[in-house]
Amino acid sequence: MPHKIAFALVDFGFMRLGASAIRAAHTTWNDASRKVLQRIGMKFIGINSKGFQKRGTWVEEYGYEIRLTAP
């Protein structure tokens, strides 16, 4: 079911907010998030070595993106 929620959020971003691209990120150890992002069509775009800080230490993230395609 998480993929259905993620798909609805992407749909909202494109259809209601008028976004042309949507980005997401997950920590390198979070395989479940990777699978959800890939399942809804997001493509890997790179690694952010300073995604966010946790207890004073930078946590690495994988970035994903999906772009609105012309009909």
Image (spheres, rainbow, N blue to C red):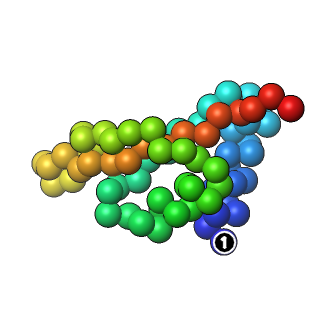
Q: Nearer the viewer, residue 6 or 45?
A: 45
Reply above or below: 69 against 39: above
Check the image and name the residue furthest to the left: 56
Vertical order, 66 against 9 (above or below): above
Q: Is residue 17 left or right of residue 62?
A: right
Vertical position of residue 36 compared to residue 26: above or below: below
Q: Nearer the viewer, residue 1 or 70?
A: 70
- Secondary structure at badge 1 equals loop
Seen at 65% across and 34% down, the residue is: 67
Q: Quadrant of residue 30?
A: bottom left
x and y, in percent, of residue 71 in the image: 86, 32
Tell me which amino acid carries mark 1. Answer: Met
- The structure residue drawn at horizontal position 26% and vertical position 48%, both measured from the top left corner, is 60
- Count of marks placed on residues: 1
Quadrant of the rendered image containing residue 5: bottom right
Residue occupying the point 32% across, 63% down: 29
| Residue 31 placement (x, y as % from top left) | 42, 66
Q: Residues within 10 Å of mark 1 (few under 14, many from 20)?
A: few
Q: Is residue 35 left or right of residue 56?
A: right
Q: Position of residue 47 (x, y in %)?
A: 33, 42
Q: Is residue 52 visible?
A: no
Tell which of 68 and 18 is nearer to you: 68
Q: Which residue is mark 1?
A: 1
Pick out the residue farthest to the right.
71
Which quarter of the picture shows residue 17? top right
Identified at 55% across, 55% down, the residue is: 37
Q: Is residue 41 visible?
A: yes
Answer left or right for 24 relative to 68. left
